[in-house]
Image (cartoon, rainbow, N blue to C red):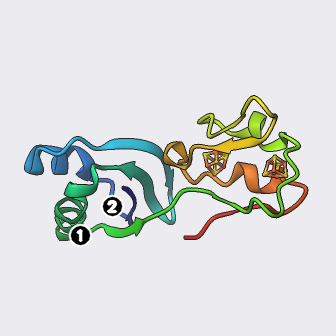
Amino acid sequence: MKLLVRLIHDSKPIIAQVVRDTGVLINVDRARSDAHEGEEALVDVPDESCMLVSERMRSLGAEVSILEEGIRHDEDECVDCGACISVCPKEVFSFDDDWKLQVMTKRCILCGRCIQSCPHAALSLNN
Ligand code: SF4
Ligand code: SF4
């Protein structure tokens, strides 16, 4: 499960603290820091530990959103052009033997790069 974690004007390393406190392995998919808006991180946690981790993060002052889906692919709009394949940093997209696009949404880190690359508006983010 993906969690979007926001720390407003606070630079405490809470992810490391939450790992210590809960014993749950947390993978950081991406993170960014802004002097005005604070820090934001997209993290991946096991589904069964999602509530435990998010509640501990909130108790430490973070805003936490649970993101239930990766990229959305509209098969009716897709023309299998492959433009999304090269822009994705996580190799979410590939062709099968019939040159039909395959989408591994579990790998998606919700960066949004592929959305701009699609000429048929077949890709979108739900959250
Ligand atoms: S949002 Fe980013 S990681 Fe997800 S499929 Fe698109 S390019 Fe890949
Ligand atoms: S860029 Fe859009 S139309 Fe082209 S393969 Fe990817 S999802 Fe399909």
Work out whether residue 58 or residue 124 is closer to the camera in this orientation and state it: 124
User: Could one spot residue 8 in this view of the protein?
Assistant: no
Where on the picture, by quarter, is residue 82? Answer: top right
- Numbered label attached to residue 10: 2
Residue displayed at 30% across by 67% down: 62
Where on the picture, by quarter, is residue 100? Answer: top right
Q: Amino acid at mark 1?
A: Arg
- The residue where tag 1 is placed is 58
Q: Position of residue 90 (x, y in %)?
A: 59, 36
Residue displayed at 67% across by 55% down: 112
Quadrant location, the C terminus: bottom right
Q: Position of residue 30 (x, y in %)?
A: 49, 45
Q: Position of residue 88 (x, y in %)?
A: 68, 39
Q: Is 13 placed left or right of 89 in the picture?
A: left
Where on the picture, by quarter, is residue 52? Answer: bottom left
- Numbered label attached to residue 5: none
Within 8 Å of ligand 1, the CB of disc 2?
A: no
In this rendering, the answer to whether 29 lies above or below 5 is: above
Q: Position of residue 48 (x, y in %)?
A: 21, 56
Residue displayed at 44% across by 65% down: 67
Q: Earlier in the sequence, mark 2 or mark 1?
A: 2
In this rendering, the answer to whether 6 lies above or below 1 is: below
How far apart are the two marked residues, 2 and 1, measured between alpha carbons? 13 Å
